[in-house]
Amino acid sequence: MPSASRKWTLDSIPDQTGRLVVVTGANSGIGRITAETLARRGAHVVLACRSPQRGQAALDRLLARAPEARAEVRLLDLADLASIRKFADDWDHDRLDLLVNNAGVAMVPFARTADGFESQFGINHLGTFALTGLMLPHLLASPVPRVVTVSSEGQRFARFDPDNLNAERRYRAMFAYLQSKRANLYFATELQRRADAAGLRLRSMAVAPGLTRTNVLTGGANVNRGRLYAASTRLLLRVAFRPTPMGAKTSLYAATVPDLPGGAYIVPDGPLQLRGEPVQRTRERAIRDATTARRLWELSETLTGVRYQLSEDAQCRTPLEVPNE
């Protein structure tokens, strides 16, 4: 495994030919760079996007830059369980080698998803949980399946409240965002525990990108927050945040380093994980908190109606769906 002392670059990525990949939120930001880089390295990449127009524009841009790339766009809205189920039901490839759970929203005004969940918890965690579970049979049909889930360096500051995950009480945008990103880390590590217990080859990793210039703070639900918010946020992004390709490095590292162990958490090696080169972090309280992770998993199954089939013959079956309670 590359160490922080030997700089890892995008040129370090091995040939990805023959690998079948899904990247959620692949039309912009870190997701776009991740999808483009993997496609340039030979992978067949599915750009899973909420907007057909933005998804097609991203695909056109990718193919203009890499005409020989194998890539396609498929619609996926993580704010709608029906859309997630349709994406999984319509999957017509023989397997899935890599799922990059990249899509998300950040610090948006209060809103509910199509299924009534607080939007940051619903999209960032529950949507990711449901998609991974529904795509699990296809992942387990791969000889070397891998799931990469994008968390955030900010999750370290989350005050995780299992009784207020869905904004049952007071809503604070920053609190809800950080909590959803902590949930991403709990999910990735608990998925690895369950895969290991079932004797599966699946490897699940989480990453933190560091401070990165993307449209997550200015696009989507943040578009209508006024000129002052837009101007100040753009200035902050330009001054304090690093270019998008740098932020994509942890995702690409977790997705492509061959001997990276399941359960790894990849972060920038700089102060406060804000910038730097990809490195595995093992001293993280959330990684060891199996009790909270298990409680969140059980709640997520209840809310989404998706129960994982983690067994050696799971590739022959589809995930169970139970009625939402």
Image (cartoon, grey):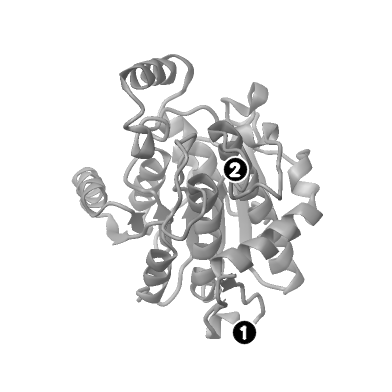
Q: Position of residue 11 (x, y in %)?
A: 44, 39
Q: Position of residue 22 (x, y in %)?
A: 41, 59
Quarter placement of the N terminus: top right
Kind of residue indicated by mark 2: Lys
In the rendered structure, the answer to whether residue 65 lies left or right of residue 77 reads left
Residue drawn at 24 percent across, 51 percent down: 59
Other-residue count near label 2 (Cα within 10 Å), few / some / many at <14 / 14–19 / ≥20: many
Kind of residue indicated by mark 1: Asp
Q: Nearer the viewer, residue 291 or 98?
A: 291
Query: Which mark is in front, 1 or 2?
Result: 2
Could you give the CA–CA distance between mark 1 and mark 2, rounded to whole angstroms? 31 Å
Q: Which residue is mark 2?
A: 181
In this view, 175 is above or below 102: above
Q: Which residue is mark 1?
A: 313
Please identify the quarter of the rendering in which residue 169 is found.
top right
Q: Nearer the viewer, residue 142 or 1?
A: 142
In this view, 139 is above or below 147: below
Please identify the quarter of the rendering in which residue 7 is found.
top right
Badge 2 marks a residue whose secondary structure is helix
Q: Is residue 114 visible in this depiction of the protein?
A: yes
